[in-house]
Amino acid sequence: MADLSELDDIPGTTVFTAQRSRKGYWLNQFCMSLMKADNRDRFHADERAYLDEWPLSEAQKQAVLTRDYNAAIAEGGNIYFLAKLFASDGKSFQDAAGSMTGMTPEAYAQMMLDGGRSIEGWRSKKEGR
Amino acid sequence: MARITAGLTTSHIPAVGAAFDLGKTETDYWRPVFEGYDWTKQWIRQNLPDVVVLVYNDHASAFSLELIPTFAIGCADQFPPADEGYGPRPVPVVEGHADLAWHLAQELILDEFDITIINKMEVDHGLTVPMSLVFGKVDAWPVRVIPIPVNVVQYPPPTGNRCYLLGQAIRRAVEAFPEDLNVHVWGTGGMSHQLQGPRAGLINREFDMDFLDRLIHDPESLRSMPHLRYLREAGSEGIELVMWLIMRGAMGGAVKELRRFYHVPASNTALGHLVIEPAG
């Protein structure tokens, strides 16, 4: 049987396992609905009302309303689904990914220009490497 | 008989598609990315295949959480570009090759690869960005395409070994097709990148270089690489690299490296690109 505990040993990383997929099912399906222009218009006209049409937890709704992507992922969201949300805001993957790091957009962009985040220190929590 | 004459790998970063569509290919940031494909654009004009078997992952566009096929094959005549939240990319509709696709589906299933048959599907940046990079801006794509979407969104994706074996089975199936067709197999996605969480922006050049070398010269050694190693070393989205093993399995034994290009950054990602052909 697969031992999934190792997946949680990777720092700053959430792997989209079955458990998370089940938790985030409706959050992710809400994101899918934003692939239709009519739905995007309705959502942006009244985000709370649109979210209330979906069987989401309050924590999931708050994560969407505040565009807190780390919180959305903690609530079962998957980044490829959440991409429909930030794309509908006119945001790029770099904007969204950067927002999850605690860095300013400028500092994140500069880190990428400098070759990206180094793997050193980001491999394993328990091994501290 | 149909034959596989070349393999190609490339990243399929959505921002590359956006830069292409918005006419930003000549900016200081994007020019080096697009120039990296100049060689390939020339090469493919002289080596135009009839059909590209294009291995990619759908990014929650055609497949939501309602339905998650591990391996699937597009058997339709046409595949329109998907609306991923900002309107469909302004690129031509992708023309399929239903005769070969249905043949592949039949042969693969009888060869014990239980692949899902798709007769209606929209294709997202995972498929259309590689097409734009290789063929540029065109009114109609110059090749037919058989999409092979692979699940790498929901854990677990298929193992690298399974991907490699599928590639070998694709080769057998293509070679059993009676019509004389020139076929390329493309593997897309990668290389190292992470799009989520506090570790976002991860790039591991050392891993990527080793992966490229082994993919060309020692693919057998990649068959046993566990998911954990991809996730740890290449980032949560670097797991897309298992799809490159489908391409490599389809090339058979030794290959000749025709082109290699590696560039950091393209948005959040290390862009990697190879063109190879079966040796001998």
Image (cartoon, rainbow, N blue to C red):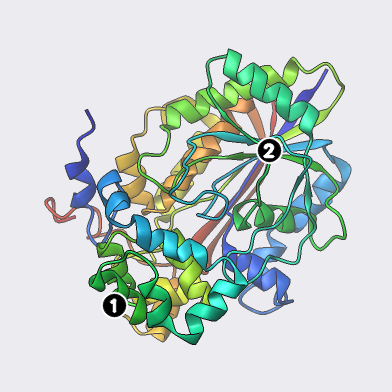
| Above or below for B264 versus A5 | below
Q: Position of residue B37 (x, y in %)?
A: 71, 57
* Amino acid type, callout 2: Asn
Q: In the drawing, does residue B17 fall left or right of residue B222? A: right
Give the residue number, with chain letter if any, for mark 1: A62
Give neighbour class at mark 1: few <14, some 14-19, many 20+ (Cα, 10 Å). Answer: some
Badge 2 and badge 1 both on one subunit: no
- Of the pair B237 and A107, the residue shown nearer to us: B237
Residue at (65% x, 65% y) in the render: B17
Q: Position of residue A93 (x, y in %)?
A: 48, 70
Residue B17 visible: yes
Residue B253 visible: no
Q: In the drawing, does residue B199 fall left or right of residue B67? A: left
Q: Quadrant of residue B186?
A: top right
Q: Position of residue A99 (x, y in %)?
A: 36, 77
* On-image quarter of the N terminus of chain B: top right
Q: Chain of mark 1?
A: A
* Amino acid type, callout 1: Gln
- Whole-number angstrom distance, CA of label 2 to CA of label 1: 38 Å
* On-image quarter of the C terminus of chain B: top right
The residue most toward the left is A126
Q: Quadrant of residue B55?
A: top right
Q: Chain of mark 2?
A: B
Numbered disc total: 2
Residue at (61% x, 20% y) in the render: B108
Q: In the drawing, does residue B111 fall left or right of residue B47? A: left
Give the residue number, with chain letter if any, for mark 2: B119
Q: Position of residue B195 (x, y in %)?
A: 41, 63
